[in-house]
Image: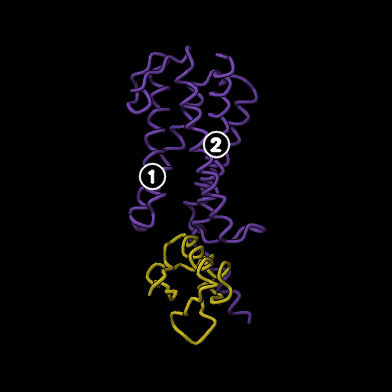
Chain colours: A yellow, B purple
């Protein structure tokens, strides 16, 4: 399972980075920035719950979990 | 018992109005993309959502208790079809209209994952109609409209929503970029 940001929807509200700091941080403009090297970071089993919550929290539905 | 039902019906109605006011103000704040001190970004959305759903629960009790109330003389059809009531049909009808709007907004919002952001947002615009309709219903149908406490609640709520909507319409609402650009420039 990987986490994917739909950049056509994202407006940099920054809720995802608050809920998933293990994988995401924000740039100076509030847009999510992947902390690792991967474009769509792998979500480990231990982070799955937090990732789902971050997906739910996005006000613009810009965050998705992909296989 | 009847007194209790009447008090419950009025009370839940007024508190629902207050939590819907909170929800609409927080919704406008959240839409602006600005964080609120102490709440965080995800917290703001959660409180917005929780306030709205609390209001839905209160309205369910509000409508339910007034069905059982002998003075209100509501029929089942009055819960869905507006303007058919026997007691102040216009003002009661506005309440029914508000319930209909609330039902649509709530169902679509809960199904957000499946309907997608476009429909979600379009239906969410209905709240700008829902709130004034509910307020008019409260003042016109409620029997507390001329009491000081009710008028204080109404004035504070209307002031809060009017201020939020006015801000929403100002050009500065969308200009989150101003502070952001300043931060980059000064680095």
**Numbered circle sitting on residue B186:** none
What quarter of the picture does the C terminus of chain B occupy? bottom right
Task: Name the chain under label 2.
Answer: B
Tell me the quarter of the image containing the N terminus of chain B: top right
* SS for callout 1: helix
Provide the residue designation for mark 2: B158
Dot 1, how many residues are within 10 Å of its Cα: few (below 14), some (14-19), or many (20+)? few
Q: CA distance from mark 2 to mark 1?
A: 26 Å
Q: Do the residues indicated by labels 2 and 1 lie within the same chain of the protein?
A: yes
Position of residue B102 relative to residue A37, above or below, is: above
Residue found farthest to the bottom = A37
Which mark's residue is nearer the viewer, 2 or 1?
Answer: 1
A46 vs A53, nearest the viewer: A46
Residue B107 is labelled as 1
Q: A67 left or right of B27? A: left
| Residue found at x 46% / y 26% | B63
Say what secondary structure mark 2 lies in.
Answer: helix
Residue situated furthest right in the rendering:
B38
Where on the picture, by quarter, is residue B6?
top right
Q: Is B162 in front, or is A2?
A: A2
Return the chain for callout 1.
B
Identified at 54% across, 75% down, the residue is A24
For the point 46% across and 64% down, the residue is A55
């Amino acid at each position: 399972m990987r986490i994917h940001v739909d950049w056509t929807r994202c407006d940099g509200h920054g809720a995802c980075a608050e809920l998933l700091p293990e994988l995401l941080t924000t740039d100076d403009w509030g847009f999510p920035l992947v902390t690792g090297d991967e474009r769509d970071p792998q979500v480990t089993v231990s982070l799955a719950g937090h990732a789902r919550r971050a997906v739910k929290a996005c006000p613009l539905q810009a965050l998705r979990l992909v296989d | 018992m009847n007194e209790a039902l009447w008090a419950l019906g009025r009370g839940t109605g007024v508190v629902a109005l207050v939590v819907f006011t909170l929800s609409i103000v927080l919704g406008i704040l959240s839409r602006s993309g600005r964080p609120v001190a102490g709440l965080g970004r995800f917290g703001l959305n959660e409180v917005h959502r929780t306030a709205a759903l609390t209001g839905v629960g209160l309205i369910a009790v509000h409508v339910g208790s007034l069905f059982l109330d002998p003075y209100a003389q509501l029929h089942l059809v009055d819960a869905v079809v507006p303007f058919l009531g026997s007691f102040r049909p216009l003002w009661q009808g506005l309440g029914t209209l508000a319930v209909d709007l609330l039902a649509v907004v709530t169902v679509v919002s809960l199904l957000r994952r499946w309907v997608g952001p476009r429909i979600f947002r379009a239906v969410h615009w209905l709240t700008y109609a829902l709130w004034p309709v509910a307020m008019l219903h409260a003042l016109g149908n409620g029997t507390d409209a001329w009491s000081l406490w009710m008028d204080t609640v109404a004035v504070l709520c209307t002031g809060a929503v009017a201020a939020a909507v006015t801000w929403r319409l100002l050009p500065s609402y969308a200009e989150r970029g101003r502070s952001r650009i300043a931060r980059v420039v000064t680095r």
